[in-house]
């Protein structure tokens, strides 16, 4: 009798705990399977770059990786970890680090989608003397790693000073790697120039969704010292960087794009959209988003044409044309259409929207159904004029009044330019 009572005393709470655990686990598995189905249906199954591959023969489904992943990219499906939302993986490897049985390997690219990774030595110099690469272009994502690499690359460069009249280094890009490198160049007293194709600081971080929580480990920034942030909003991080840049009067040449690099024996001539600079070294801190793809149509150089949407509110009450067929084009069009009195046309050359998130497809259909948004499939911009645009559509030319054009047609990666200057580039298909 006594034994039965003792058993009940322990067994009942244990069974209750187990039941709750199993229910939660089932709920999480159902959710993960749903996320995976959505990603598959939308054709979003290829990770951008570095990502985890789980060995199912080792994985015991502990879920440690899914909890460690801040992007919600992993889930447990059929008792094993699975990359259920591949395109949101940013490759920082928190999953691999927490796996208790080492079932996760981080690799670049997949069988179907190769990822070009340039060869970089441990000191961040490429196989081409005097050309360095730091940050995500070299393959490793993460703000801290990019900033560390930028700083370390400058340490090496500062040992290779240039002859009089030359720059020691041209730093290309003002994302985390370029900012840190620029601060390092100032601290080391180098003759340098930093160019950035956009009008803003922060690189990829600048383009995160509004209020995104950024997770970053402590980093040593030249002139600023050790910076501990942990979790911080995108806006606060950008403000922090702008503060340093402002306080130290860091010279960054915004709106200047690197177009070509020509070797002249001892150093390089760097051709940009604003001129030519002679330098001993070049640090490419240009990330992997590339240069925005242009339409190549008359009128594209008008100031009303931009390649990203920053603040939908600024377009309120204006006629806007969005061009593109991916998630960023749809997100831009839908958020603009939500601004009162803002007629929006979305033009896409395809017959249907292919690889887009289900959520975006639904929001687009809703805005279209409510008459807030016009969608022109199988269409292409013919000409952009100051007050109107003309598009070619299946039904013939279509004219729309227009105050702004937002082109979301993706980016062109710099791989051809890297190869042209002799940098070795390896296309990885699922290898480390
Ligand atoms: C949605 C998302 C969320 C993320 N969240 C996190 C996170 O929470 N924590 C974290 O640590 N990391 C995160 N990352 C990864 C992190 O943002 C990147 O690893 C980091 O920004 C890379 O820095 P970078 O300086 O190498 O490149 P980038 O930040 O991409 O900066 C490159 C800069 O170079 C400029 N450039 C490019 N080409 C040229 C040219 N030809 N001429 C002149 N300028 C040029 C670009 O305009 C850009 O400003 C996230 C990434 C994404 C996409
Ligand atoms: S690499 Fe980072 S974002 Fe990708 S699955 Fe692992 S923890 Fe998540």
Image (cartoon, rainbow, N blue to C red):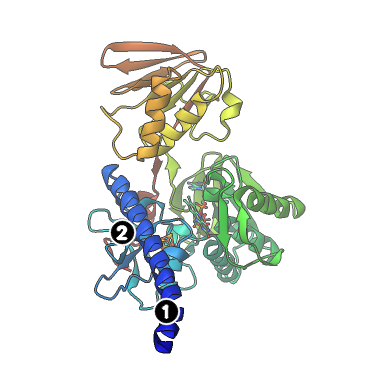
Residue nearer the viewer, 156 or 307: 307
Residue 86 placement (x, y as % from top left): 35, 54
Q: Residues within 10 Å of mark 1 (few under 14, many from 20)?
A: few
| Residue that extends furthest to the right in the rendered view of this protein | 247
Q: Comparing marks 1 and 2, which lies closer to the viewer? A: 1
* 3D distance between C-alphas at marks 1 and 2: 54 Å
Q: Which mark is residue 109?
A: 2
The residue shown at (56%, 30%) is: 312
Count of marks placed on residues:
2
| The label number, if any, that marks residue 394 in the structure image | none
**Which of the two residues, 301 or 400, is positioned nearer the viewer here?**
400
Residue 102, above or below 117 = below
Question: Residue 430: x and y, percent?
Answer: 28, 63
Outermost residue to the front: 1
Q: Residue at x 64, y 62 (%)?
A: 229
Quadrant in which the C terminus appears: bottom left
182 left or right of 304 in image: right
Q: Secondary structure at mark 2?
A: loop
Kindly identify the residue that appears in the image at 26 percent across and 61 percent down: 429
Residue 8 marker: 1
What element does badge 1 sit on?
A: helix
Q: Nearer the viewer, residue 63 or 51?
A: 63
Q: In this rendering, does residue 389 appear at all?
A: yes
């Amino acid at each position: 009798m006594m034994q039965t009572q003792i058993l009940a005393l322990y067994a009942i709470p244990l069974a209750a705990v187990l039941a709750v655990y199993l229910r939660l686990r089932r709920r999480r598995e159902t959710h993960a399977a749903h996320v995976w189905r959505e990603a598959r249906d939308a054709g979003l199954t290829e990770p951008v770059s570095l990502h985890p591959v789980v060995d199912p023969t080792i994985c015991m489904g502990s879920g440690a990786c899914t909890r460690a992943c801040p992007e919600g990219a992993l889930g447990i499906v059929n008792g094993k970890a699975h990359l259920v939302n591949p395109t949101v993986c940013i490759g920082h490897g928190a999953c691999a680090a927490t796996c208790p049985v080492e079932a996760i390997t981080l690799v670049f690219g997949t069988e179907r989608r190769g990822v070009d990774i340039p060869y970089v030595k441990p000191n961040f110099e490429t196989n081409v003397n005097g050309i360095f690469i730091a940050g995500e272009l070299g393959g490793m994502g993460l703000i801290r790693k990019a900033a560390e690499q930028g700083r370390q690359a400058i340490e090496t460069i500062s040992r290779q000073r240039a002859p009089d009249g030359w720059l020691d280094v041209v730093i290309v890009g003002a994302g985390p790697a370029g900012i840190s490198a620029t601060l390092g160049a100032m601290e080391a007293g180098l003759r340098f120039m930093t160019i950035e194709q956009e009008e803003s600081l922060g690189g990829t971080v600048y383009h995160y969704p509004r209020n995104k929580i950024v997770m970053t480990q402590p980093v040593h920034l030249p002139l600023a010292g050790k910076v501990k942030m942990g979790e911080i909003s995108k806006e606060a991080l950008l403000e922090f960087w702008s503060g340093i840049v402002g306080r130290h009067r860091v010279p960054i040449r915004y709106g200047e794009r690197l177009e070509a690099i020509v070797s002249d024996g001892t150093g390089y001539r760097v051709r940009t959209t604003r001129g030519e600079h002679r330098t001993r070294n070049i640090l490419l801190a240009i990330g992997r988003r590339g240069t925005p793809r242009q339409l190549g149509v008359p009128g594209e150089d008008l100031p009303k044409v931009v390649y990203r949407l920053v603040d939908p509110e600024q377009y309120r009450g204006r006629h806007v044309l969005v061009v593109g067929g991916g998630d960023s084009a749809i997100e831009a069009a839908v958020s603009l259409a939500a601004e009162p009195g803002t007629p929006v046309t979305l033009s896409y050359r395809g017959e249907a929207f292919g690889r887009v998130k289900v959520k975006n497809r639904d929001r687009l259909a809703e805005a279209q159904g409510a008459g807030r948004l016009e969608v022109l499939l199988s269409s292409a911009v013919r000409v952009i004029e100051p007050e109107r645009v003309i598009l070619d559509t299946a039904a013939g030319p279509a004219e729309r009044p227009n105050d702004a054009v937002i082109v979301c047609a993706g980016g062109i990666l710099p791989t051809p330019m890297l190869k042209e200057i002799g940098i070795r580039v390896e296309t990885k298909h699922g290898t480390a």
